[in-house]
Every structure is written in structure tokens, then in C-alpha cells.
């Protein structure tokens, strides 16, 4: 029996080392691109830009954040707000702004009993209403980090660049949930921004995203995944981004900040919606994400199993400490780049909690289906 136990723990330890190596490959081969990225001194433009925002019962947030979008320090832009069947005071508030901001354009959708639409339909109408070729997207609950947001995001548009990926962090507040939500956002950004910098873009976030109008209509917009309620941002980018047509903007003044959810239940629902699209990514991208998530989860599962089987704890502790220390330089550099420095000190705990929650989000997605975009 002792011989069998020794054989089992030996195999498990080898697997543990393999998962550790895979994780180090992800951090030092892939994520290092973001960690050690040097700012690209591009100065393209200024191009006429149309900013598009979808709003559904968002009058409170529009009052807080829309003026910062309308008051960008940029010579030629319009802001299109798609009022998607709101029943609050969104319509009245937007109308009150038209006399103050000549660049504000309102597209209003009315509820129809026979036809229920999602955000993709609302966005499509906003894109059709845009007078400019260059489109910049954000959400009603987002505020640009500076008046230079629009200028910084559009500067990458050149002859071959059709897509620009930005960063959309959440506002810092007190409490562990806020840190967890921000860590989740930071970790996702570390993956997709590093991939894009490595000429293999696979997603973007609608809180801070730009692309050309011609690209949208040339590729038939959201037609390929219109049956999926989510994915107006990541699925569109997954289908159309290439190594040649995509750029990344990482100046902190180009970030757009959103309000984080206040309760775990609200965040859980949001995460389910965001994760519902991953299964529709291209095969190579799914493999990239699966191997990263699977190796990190297996590392901790194997670590716990070996501790239960009373494997040499000093060896396990040394392996864990080595893994942590070897990844910290990448995490530090990425968090500094994305202005999430405070997350570094909670990284070991946040990582464990984040890894434990991922399977729960996946299982919940299997058994539930989203019915509305808000």
C-alpha cells in the first residue's frame, strides 16, 4: 500500500511541476509583452470620430459621466447615444443636453411587443447613424480618464489599422469584492492585451474600443453571432481582428473607468454574461485560454492533494514560493502599466479566490441562459 501511495504522489508531483512550468511559460512568454511594452509614439490624425454609447435606463449614470465624453479636447467628433427603450428620464435628460452640446446625436428605440432586440441591434442603429468612418465605443457607466481619451484612442488609425483595443478598468473602492472584480478585469486584460501585442488579438471590451465603420459593414457586422445575446465586443473582435489590422492603446489617459458591482450576486450575473461568449471563439484562442485556466486550477488542486497525501511539505512550499516569486515581476510590471498597483499586495489571495470561482461561473453558464442585455 505504501508503495502504491509513493507511486501516486510521485506522479502527482510530476504533474504539479508540469502545471507550474506551463504557468511560467504563459507569464514569461506571453504576458511579458504587456509587462515590458514600450509606448508607441504614434501621432496619427486627427480623424473625425463618432463616439457610440448604448443606454437602457441609465439616466443616473449619464448625468454623472456623459458630460466628460461630450467635453473631450478634440476638434471634430460627435457623440451618438442610443436610447434603447428606456422608461426612466433618459429621453428628457438627453434632450436637455442638445442645446448645450451641438455634437450630441440621439437615436431612440421604442419597445415592440412582437420583436425583442438586444444590444447588438441598438449598436447597429447607432453605427448606421454615425456620420464618421472612425467609431469609438464606450458604455453609459464609463468615464474617460482624461479629456485626451478620444485623441489617444484614434491616433492609431492608419492605412492598415482598423481596430484599436483600449483598457477599461473599474473604479477603486473599499472592500475585498472591489479588489476581486478589479483583479478579474486586470487578469483578463493581461491576457487579451498581451495577445494583441503578440500579433494574435482575440477580444476587446466594449467599454473602450474603436474600429472603422467600413470594417463593420464589410464583414456584415454582428450577423454571424446575432443569435447570441452577448458578444457585441469580444466576438466581433475575435472574428475580425488580425495581426495586421489591430493596435493597442495603453496610455493611462486613454483608460475608461466603470462602476464595479456592489454585491457578489450582481457581479456573478455580469460574469456569466461575459463568459457566455468564450465558447464561440476561434479554436486556437479557446485552446490558449483553456490551457492557461486549466493549468492554474490544476496546480492548486494538485498542491492540495499532495498536502493531504502528506507529501514532503517543504518541497511543496518551496515550489509554490518559487512559482509566486518568478511570476511577481510580470504581475508587478503589468499592474504598474495598467495602474492597478495596489492589487499586487493581494495577488496570492486574489489569484486563489479567482481560480476557485472560474468553474462556478462556467457551470452557472451551462444551466442558465441570459434573456436581456440589461
Image: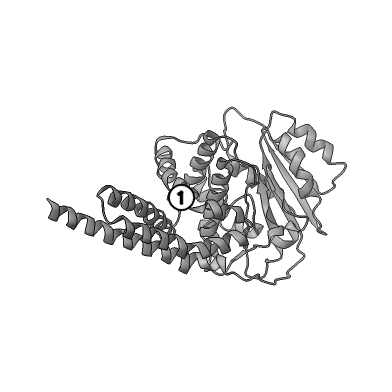
The picture places residue 8, in percent across and down from the top left corner, at 20, 55
Q: Say above or below: 329 vs 108.
A: below
Q: Is residue 201 left or right of residue 82?
A: left
**Residue 131 or residue 310, whichever sits in front:** 310
In this rendering, the count of numbered labels is 1
Nearest the camera: 236 or 71?
A: 71
149 versus 226 height, above or below: below
Q: Residue 50 appears at what percent x and percent y?
A: 73, 53
| Point 84% across, 41% down: residue | 98
Residue shown at the point (40%, 44%) measured from the top left: 359
Q: Where is the C terminus found, in terms of image quarters?
A: top right
Q: Quadrant of residue 281?
A: bottom left
Q: Judge left or right: residue 297 versus residue 176.
A: left
Q: Is residue 115 visible?
A: yes
Circle 1 crowding by C-alpha within 10 Å: few under 14, some 14–19, many from 20 = some
Snapshot quadrant of residue 362:
top left
Residue that label 1 marks: 278
- Residue depicted at 63% across the width and 52% down the height: 168
Decide which of 214, 187 is in the foreground and name it: 187
Q: How is the image coloured?
A: one colour
- Residue 54 at x, y percent in the picture: 67, 42
Give the quarter of the image for residue 42. Answer: bottom right
- The secondary element bearing badge 1 is classed as helix
Image location (x, y in percent) of residue 32? 52, 67
Residue 236 appears in view:
no
Q: Residue at x 42, y 45 (%)?
A: 356
Q: Nearer the viewer, residue 328 or 150?
A: 328
Q: Residue furthest right?
A: 99
Does residue 99 sit above or below 287 in this rendering? above
Residue with the most extreme front position: 314
Q: Is residue 140 above or below residue 218?
A: above
Amino acid at each position: 500500500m505504501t508503495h502504491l501511495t509513493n507511486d501516486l504522489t510521485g506522479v502527482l508531483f510530476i504533474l504539479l511541476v508540469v502545471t507550474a512550468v506551463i504557468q511560467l511559460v504563459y507569464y514569461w512568454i506571453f504576458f511579458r509583452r504587456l509587462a515590458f511594452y514600450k509606448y508607441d509614439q504614434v501621432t496619427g490624425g486627427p480623424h473625425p470620430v463618432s463616439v457610440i454609447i448604448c443606454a437602457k435606463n441609465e439616466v443616473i449614470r449619464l448625468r454623472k459621466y456623459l458630460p466628460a465624453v461630450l467635453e473631450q479636447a478634440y476638434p471634430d467628433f460627435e457623440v451618438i447615444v442610443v436610447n434603447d427603450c428606456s422608461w426612466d428620464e433618459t429621453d428628457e435628460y438627453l434632450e436637455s443636453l442638445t442645446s448645450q452640446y451641438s455634437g450630441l446625436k440621439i437615436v431612440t428605440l421604442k419597445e415592440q411587443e412582437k420583436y425583442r432586440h438586444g444590444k447588438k441591434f441598438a449598436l447597429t442603429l447607432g453605427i448606421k447613424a454615425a456620420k464618421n468612418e472612425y467609431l469609438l465605443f464606450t458604455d453609459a457607466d464609463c468615464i474617460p480618464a482624461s479629456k485626451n481619451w478620444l485623441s489617444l484612442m484614434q491616433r492609431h488609425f492608419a492605412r492598415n489599422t482598423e481596430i484599436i483595443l483600449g483598457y477599461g478598468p473599474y473604479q477603486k473602492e473599499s472592500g475585498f469584492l472591489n479588489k476581486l472584480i478589479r483583479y478579474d478585469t486586470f487578469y483578463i486584460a493581461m491576457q487579451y492585451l498581451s495577445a494583441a501585442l503578440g500579433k494574435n488579438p482575440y477580444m476587446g471590451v466594449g467599454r473602450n474600443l474603436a474600429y472603422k465603420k467600413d470594417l463593420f459593414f464589410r464583414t456584415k457586422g454582428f450577423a454571424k453571432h446575432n443569435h447570441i445575446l452577448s458578444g457585441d465586443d469580444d466576438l466581433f473582435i475575435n472574428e475580425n481582428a488580425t495581426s495586421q489590422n489591430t493596435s493597442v492603446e495603453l496610455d493611462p489617459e486613454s483608460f475608461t473607468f466603470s462602476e464595479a458591482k456592489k454585491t457578489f450576486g450582481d457581479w456573478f450575473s455580469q460574469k456569466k454574461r461575459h463568459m457566455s461568449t468564450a465558447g464561440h471563439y476561434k479554436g486556437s484562442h479557446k485552446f490558449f485560454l483553456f490551457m492557461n485556466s486549466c493549468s492554474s486550477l490544476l496546480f492548486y488542486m494538485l498542491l492540495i492533494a499532495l498536502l493531504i497525501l502528506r507529501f514532503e511539505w517543504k518541497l511543496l512550499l518551496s515550489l509554490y514560493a518559487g512559482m509566486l516569486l518568478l511570476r511577481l515581476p510580470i504581475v508587478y510590471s503589468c499592474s504598474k502599466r495598467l495602474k492597478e498597483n495596489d492589487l499586487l499586495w493581494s495577488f496570492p489571495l486574489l489569484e486563489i479566490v479567482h481560480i476557485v470561482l472560474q468553474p462556478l461561473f462556467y457551470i452557472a453558464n451551462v444551466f442558465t441562459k441570459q434573456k436581456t442585455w440589461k
